[in-house]
Amino acid sequence: MGLREILKNAFQLFVGHGSISDYQPYHNAYPFTKTEYRNAKKEWPNEINNTIRTKFRSKNDVNIYLIRYLRLETGNFIPRARKLDMYYVLNDTDKILNELKFSKHKLICINDANTLDYEEK
């Protein structure tokens, strides 16, 4: 990581009052390198191997947030623009249609919701 990235991280910490907004957990795409996966597997071999072996998710499984938070701890990340991506819930039909018409973001995620009656929505 170069000086520019370190300064960006420090600035984000300062303006965010100690928080990094880009590391809030939500669904979307995140670029990771093979090296980051290898490093995580070296650091947590049992946890990762146990997760790989299970057929269904359990409360003991690990996921990509392991690597994301490792990046945060080590300062090995670059905050990205908030306009890059957006997360929507399936019930937000007006917002989704607006997004599709005007393409405000490069990447969107539309996730299901706790909907009881889809005919009503």
Image (tube, rainbow, N blue to C red):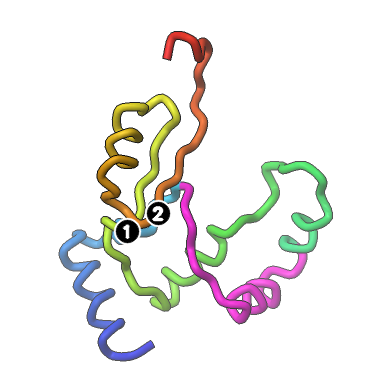
Q: Which residue is mark 2?
A: 107
> What segment carries the magenta color?
27-46
- Compared with 69, 61 (above or below) is above
Classify mark 1: helix, strand or loop: loop
Q: Of 71 and 43, which appears nearest the observer?
A: 71
Q: Amino acid at mark 2?
A: Leu
The vertical placement of 71 against 48, above or below, is: below
Residue under the image location 31 percent in, 53 percent down = 105
Give the vertical position of 113 relative to 52 (above or below). Answer: above
Judged from the image, the secondary structure of the residue bearing numbered disc 2 is strand
Marks 1/2 in contact by CB < 8 Å: the verdict is yes
- Gap in angstroms between the C-alphas marked 1 and 2: 6 Å
Q: Position of residue 56 (x, y in %)?
A: 77, 42
Look at 29% across and 40% down and name the residue there.
Answer: 101
Residue 2 position (above or below residue 59):
below
Q: Which residue is mark 1?
A: 84
State which tag comes first along the sequence, 1 or 2. 1
Quarter of the C terminus within the rendering: top left
Q: Position of residue 104 (x, y in %)?
A: 26, 50
